[in-house]
Image (tube, coloured by chain):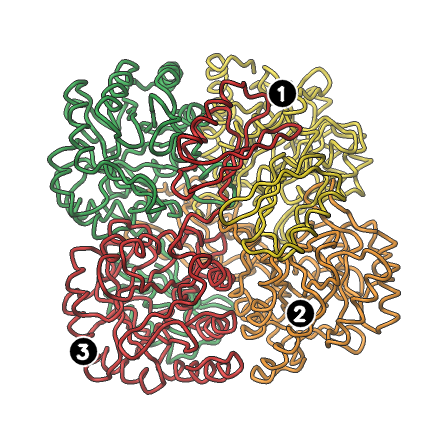
Chain colours: A orange, B yellow, C red, D green
Amino acid sequence: MIIVMKPKTEQAEIDKIKRRISELGCEIHESRGVNYLIFGLVGNTNVIDPDTFLANEGVEKVIHVQEPYKMANRLFHPEDTIVKIGDRQIGGEKFAVIAGPCSVESEEQITVIAESIKLSGAGFLRGGAYKPRSSPYSFQGLGEDGLELLKIAREKTGLPIVSELMSTEHLERFVEDVDVIQIGARNMQNFELLKEIGKVNKPIILKRGLSSTIEELLLAAEYILAQGNTQVVLCERGIRTFENYTRNTLDLSAIPVIKRLSHLPVIVDPSHAGGLWWLVEPMAKAAMVVGADGVMIEVHNDPAKAKCDGQQSIKPEKFSNLMNSLRELAKIEKRTI
Amino acid sequence: MIIVMKPKTEQAEIDKIKRRISELGCEIHESRGVNYLIFGLVGNTNVIDPDTFLANEGVEKVIHVQEPYKMANRLFHPEDTIVKIGDRQIGGEKFAVIAGPCSVESEEQITVIAESIKLSGAGFLRGGAYKPRSSPYSFQGLGEDGLELLKIAREKTGLPIVSELMSTEHLERFVEDVDVIQIGARNMQNFELLKEIGKVNKPIILKRGLSSTIEELLLAAEYILAQGNTQVVLCERGIRTFENYTRNTLDLSAIPVIKRLSHLPVIVDPSHAGGLWWLVEPMAKAAMVVGADGVMIEVHNDPAKAKCDGQQSIKPEKFSNLMNSLRELAKIEKRTI
Amino acid sequence: MIIVMKPKTEQAEIDKIKRRISELGCEIHESRGVNYLIFGLVGNTNVIDPDTFLANEGVEKVIHVQEPYKMANRLFHPEDTIVKIGDRQIGGEKFAVIAGPCSVESEEQITVIAESIKLSGAGFLRGGAYKPRSSPYSFQGLGEDGLELLKIAREKTGLPIVSELMSTEHLERFVEDVDVIQIGARNMQNFELLKEIGKVNKPIILKRGLSSTIEELLLAAEYILAQGNTQVVLCERGIRTFENYTRNTLDLSAIPVIKRLSHLPVIVDPSHAGGLWWLVEPMAKAAMVVGADGVMIEVHNDPAKAKCDGQQSIKPEKFSNLMNSLRELAKIEKRTI
Amino acid sequence: MIIVMKPKTEQAEIDKIKRRISELGCEIHESRGVNYLIFGLVGNTNVIDPDTFLANEGVEKVIHVQEPYKMANRLFHPEDTIVKIGDRQIGGEKFAVIAGPCSVESEEQITVIAESIKLSGAGFLRGGAYKPRSSPYSFQGLGEDGLELLKIAREKTGLPIVSELMSTEHLERFVEDVDVIQIGARNMQNFELLKEIGKVNKPIILKRGLSSTIEELLLAAEYILAQGNTQVVLCERGIRTFENYTRNTLDLSAIPVIKRLSHLPVIVDPSHAGGLWWLVEPMAKAAMVVGADGVMIEVHNDPAKAKCDGQQSIKPEKFSNLMNSLRELAKIEKRTI
């Protein structure tokens, strides 16, 4: 951590800061420039809140050198993490494909979709039982019944199921029923929820918040890891920008960046990012060539009648074509699928 | 709702859309331009999800005419809502001032601050017991002990207390202990939490999410209102932009906009927005002149030792000066304080 | 164009608007809903400024149906445009690779780089003679001398040259000396410059502004096209967002979107977008699989001594590897390179 | 400047960086932490491009301590700059009010507006002769004729005139004809234009770009100052964000921030920021209380027939009311108007 003192700060103020640094158990390296006085802090600076120093009038800036997350940090854990789900995995050489409808609507709907995506080669079935919707008047999901239907689809196809958890209240049920718990973008900083899922033994897919930085995403993962659950998969799903032709802007550069900063697997959701079905295939392909560990794709047998997000869902035939494209790319990228 | 069909869409597709509109119980007004065919839908379009139509290949755009929120909409509720808290209120002629530390740290700290802000004329005491922090390694608040200390401060000063609720788990306790429940920016779209606080009889301050549009804020309020709790106060606290000299960008234009769209009271938090103590006074004054119904100010007796957000907290003396400035402006703005 | 009138607007105001629409030569289709009155305008609405209507108190919203650009619009020009530069081209089956240093620094530098990129298979040489720099104290380019050195490099390698024009003052010289004129992101809405380059017979690469929407980019292209120059190539180079690990956020979804809206070729600059050399290869590959018509890559023989943007430049060896990766992908994508 | 070296960087690489620092004439203060090695550079670091260092693989981060602008920096010029325009001024105790139409349309229009704003107490007349418009099909201004009409209005009212310059081609004419040259948001980083206006003896109003940081605005001002023209007034006019109810988001926090960082006067344009006439008055008032040195207001006698930006223009009567509100606030704020 580096503290830059304002020009012309009085000696008493400078001494106060130096005492504070010492109290926090850090060593001080002092460097006096023409206009600024700079303190380099050496020690366990991760645990120091930079705001403490910024509240002093003599302090101009406080700069983090060390990343504020530890367990998610590749620096302290150089090998890639591979998250195991039964005999499947996310991370490593294999490219994971998670597919399914935005929300579970009926037994027929979910089983028909599950069977078709299995046939095309998907590895996991996704489907929402509890849906976070901007408006209270939009379809909110089938709840527990949705989970039951997902289990039926799993039984028929053998595909592990991924579903979104929105409240600690349903956690126990999710641990029992689903194979991977998804935390949605809107709950990425629902810290109470993060702490609770950190205590269970179940893989987690953590989606990046619409306006969360990569650092905040890794800190959110750190909340889970710090409680003992190390099976965390990150998911880029688009960030909010001024461009509104697309619903959000898929930040594909985030993939190589996260790979550099962290050992956790990272997947891409091209359906939610653009919010347009015809963007799904090109963006899924791009996800593979930038090094993502998988994709999460919305597939619906009748998008025009889907109860949510029909405009971003692709039909089973299009999904089958997409799988073929991904398989071709996988050869070049030295991935299996 | 308006549906714009793509040029050269086949008649069969057009007929399909028209049938769908009829099924939804809407009347169709058709308008054929040189390149586009346009359907105006008349009926209860609030309950129609525009995505349903966007999933059809022939549909170019779907445009909402009617705002998607009803109970929060001034169109259907022209008079200003005033939220009562004991013998005090937020909304109406009186300008509400809520002040206090970011987090409750000790009995001495909270009572000293409470007494000083009362002396300066604040109407409400704020203090965090549960703190949403980006890093799991930052101070997370005193929890239940914090609530107890707030109650002691209330007893000593008579100031109603405002505190942030982060989980439905603590809701019952909050209803009993605090006078106003605050929902933080990061939980603005924690829909499960919104539904639960919609069922209690307790005033709510709902903060705008860092990257939430005004429409999304009003839809989040609608979640609460739709459950029966009509005592909702909105709070602008800065949005995330590319500018990073300030922590967030305080969107003061949002105040007159919200006043036009909704009847709910709206206050401003200038402390979190900028994240810099010297911005608090000018931005609080600006909040008053643009028509806000109050401000929420972080005050700490020793910001340099505050356990969180010290850099944006002002000392009791500065708060007293700020109150004087606000009182002067209030005369011009025809508000009492 | 659709005009939505506010609820309870007086008849006199409604009549005024209707007269105005008629004066502008448009037919009116009226549609009266429960709360709103809607006018659909049929006629040559492209030439109507929506602000004209918004200035009336009775008008709630004005919505464009027709895109505001014509010559750049695929609707009126369904076939892909191919821009020819001598015996080369941008657009069509062939994937264009433009490479070279951020700025021309010396004869040796530019010729060494030109020869190496040619060997690796690049089709065009880029190099800045006039440099737009945020600070007046940064290196501003060699100016005319830079152009001379580019010409020497062209003579040695046969590669057509691409260089950035910043002022109409140098236009004549550029038309004579360079093969493709580049307009930088900061000048995308320098409308005086756009009008002038619209009058010359020379291919243009128009970079998207840092905070320009896709629609604004197409309108900027329209400025050039409307003056008669139809040889316009668009370039996505990253947009400004809240994420600051990367310099900008490369908006790859923009490629399929632009392809859908316009017939103009579109390329990607992965070097400026991320501002990090190790992001160049993955993002260039992604550009190809989402359907871009080419890439523009910064290559420098000694990045650590480059006079600008060294941190985002790759060395000739890395560029050669990148070309190999692109060639592999090209086979799958049915492009030549 | 501070350079943070990556963990495990080899000694040869470290030595290379240290040699480079010495070559640039800087002294090195070294500080070795547990994971990182940090170099503090002391010397004339303003002239060093941080990218030079970032191009080295061993370098993790480069951090500026000193602001990159000098002449605009309050650190080196503590007193407020006051820009004189004849017997008037911008900066200092007096609050400047610039008003007038978006564009000059006719002699009658501009003189009627000029006379009415003068009566209400405006100090300067604004009016566009050359208009930067997103679409080539929108009204582009009257050009030279517009300047002539502005001069007639000046003669009749004595109000100094402010008009926007878009190209160096018209510079000579502007220097002769107008009293203050305005540089629009879209040209804030038109560096060739900035250099040229830096060479003339004429006050400049420099508007902040839609997506420019405060630091970039000050660097743009530095371009002008560095050429010798010290009469620069900055103007906040809204930044581009995800919120689209308002056209842009007025960043009022930028005013106290700029006042702290720079000695240059700074004004606010509330008309362009929101793009809505009913936001002008509250935001103009807010501009005063946060410490701006003036406002620039669009006034039109018939907004519904204005050739541009009618929706954000207020009528002379509303402007008169606004002036009264500002006068009341000025008393409290100890400003004259």
- Residues B154 and C208: in front is C208
Instruction: Give amino acid for label 3.
Output: Glu
Foreground residue, A164 or B316?
Answer: A164
Neighbour class for label 2 at 10 Å: few (<14), some, many (≥20)? some
- How far separated are the C-alphas under marks 3 and 2? 52 Å
Q: Chain of mark 1?
A: B
Q: Nearer the viewer, residue B9 or C69?
A: B9
The residue to which callout 2 is attached is A318
Instruction: Please tell me the numbered disc located at residue D147.
Output: none
Residue C268's x, y, as percent?
A: 42, 67
Vertical relation: D298 (above or below) C223: above
Which of the image's four quarters has the C terminus of chain C?
bottom left
Which amino acid type is shown beneath numbered disc 2? Lys
Residue C8: tell me if it is visible: yes
Left or right of residue C170, residue A164 in this image: right
Q: Which residue is mark 1?
A: B91
Please tell me whether mark 2 sits on a helix, a strand or a loop.
helix
Question: Which disc number belongs to residue C107?
Answer: 3
Looking at the rendered structure, the secondary structure element under dot 1 is loop
- The answer, for residue D330, to whether it is visible in the render is no
* Residue D190, position as x, y percentages in the image: 26, 51
Q: Chain of mark 2?
A: A
Give the label, 3 or 2, closer to the camera: 2
Examine the rendered structure and indicate whether residue D28 appears above or below residue B45. below
- Between the C-alphas of marks 2 and 1, the distance is 54 Å
Q: Residue at x 79, y 78 (%)?
A: A87
Percent x, y of residue B228: 79, 29
Please, what is the three-letter code of the amino acid marked with disc 1?
Answer: Gly
The answer to whether B92 appears left or right of B226 in the picture is left
Locate residue A53 relative to residue D127 in the image: left or right.
Answer: right
